[in-house]
Image (cartoon, rainbow, N blue to C red):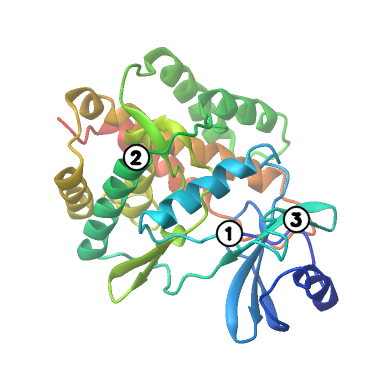
Amino acid sequence: MAVFTKLLKEDIEKFISDYSIGDLDNFEEIVDGIENSNFKIICNNQTYILTIFEKRVTEEELPFFINLKNFLNKNDFNCPKAISDKNGKILKKIKNKTAVIISFLEGKSVEKPNVKMCGEVGKMIANLHNLTSKFEEKRPNSLDLKHWKEIYKKCLNNESETFNETMHLLKNEIDYLENNWPNNIPRGVIHADLFRDNIFFKNEKISGVIDFYFSCYYFYVYDIAIVINDWCFSENGEIFHKKNFLIILEEYQKLRKLSVVEKKSFNILLRAAAVRILSTRVHDYIFHPPNAMVVKKDPFEYLNILKWHQQNEIFE
């Protein structure tokens, strides 16, 4: 989450007048993350999230995300539910941008998850994959190898020497991924963004999952790889927490067994997941919007994670 589009109180009051959620009591900007503009709004003592979609998400894709969340809600998966206005409309306009109001989930994200929490995450991902295997809509991955390569090329022209080593390593790694990309491994609709700040806990149990705007039809293992890179490494990316990894995989496989080909493809998809975050974080540092309230994240954390996977195989 982030804030690229600024709103005044009167902007929000006008927007919510089309809804049956009451009057605006208070609101605040949410600055975590890097994608859309988000506001916590409180109406008649009830909390909601107002999301304004910025450039990366196209209007044509939005019904997929809305339908996916509604499908999951109906199947008792804890994620936000889109709120309709008085005319039954979900997607609306504010400041000439598409916006939506969604339900608010209780709980908090965790910075340093323990082993028990990681086990909960493993169960949740398997449950998600089992459910989405019955979801009939598909959306291609809008941030895969082709797009990382484009991001890399865009970043090449920057004048900063800060990322010289990183750019050299990225070029070689993207070449490696292109030459070794796996095929014929199980796919389905995945979340594709299950970082710690997108999973909420209450009393060490998952209370909800948010931010489905990277969801796509892609490799199941890629979803797990993103989680392992974020949940199983130290803050600087240098230390691998094997216990976290083992419990995630153990609990996942109680509900969905990984095939032999999925295990064989794990290392390359862990490296791919690291390249995705490394390349996008470098991009966001170089092309940081001067007026945006965004929490910039450290690219070198994922440089270290990528190097670790280059030297180590999780499944040996």
Amino acid type at image mark 2? Ala
Residue 292 is left or right of residue 188, and the answer is right
The answer, for residue 162, to whether it is visible in the render is no
Q: Is residue 24 above or below residue 241?
A: below
Amino acid type at image mark 3? Lys
User: Which of the two discs, 2 and 3, labels the residue nearer the N terminus?
Assistant: 3
Tell me if label 1 and label 3 are in contact, CB under 8 Å: no
Residue at 27%, 46% (x, y): give it: 126
Dot 1: what SS?
A: loop
Give coordinates of residue 140: x percent, y percent: 53, 29
Q: Is residue 295 above or below residue 168?
A: below
**Residue of label 2:** 225
Picture disc at residue 235? none
Residue 84 is left or right of residue 204, and the answer is right
Q: Quadrant of the N terminus?
A: bottom right
Dot 3: what SS?
A: strand
Viewer-closest of 236 and 216 = 216
Give coordinates of residue 98: x percent, y percent: 75, 51
**Residue of label 3:** 92
User: Which of the two discs, 1 and 3, labels the residue nearer the N terminus?
Assistant: 1
Tell me if label 2 and label 3 are in contact, CB under 8 Å: no
The answer, for residue 149, to whether it is visible in the render is yes
What's the CA distance linking mark 1 and mark 2? 28 Å
Residue at 41%, 55% (x, y): give it: 74
**Residue of label 1:** 82
User: Which of the two discs, 1 and 2, labels the residue nearer the N terminus?
Assistant: 1
What's the CA distance linking mark 1 and mark 3? 12 Å
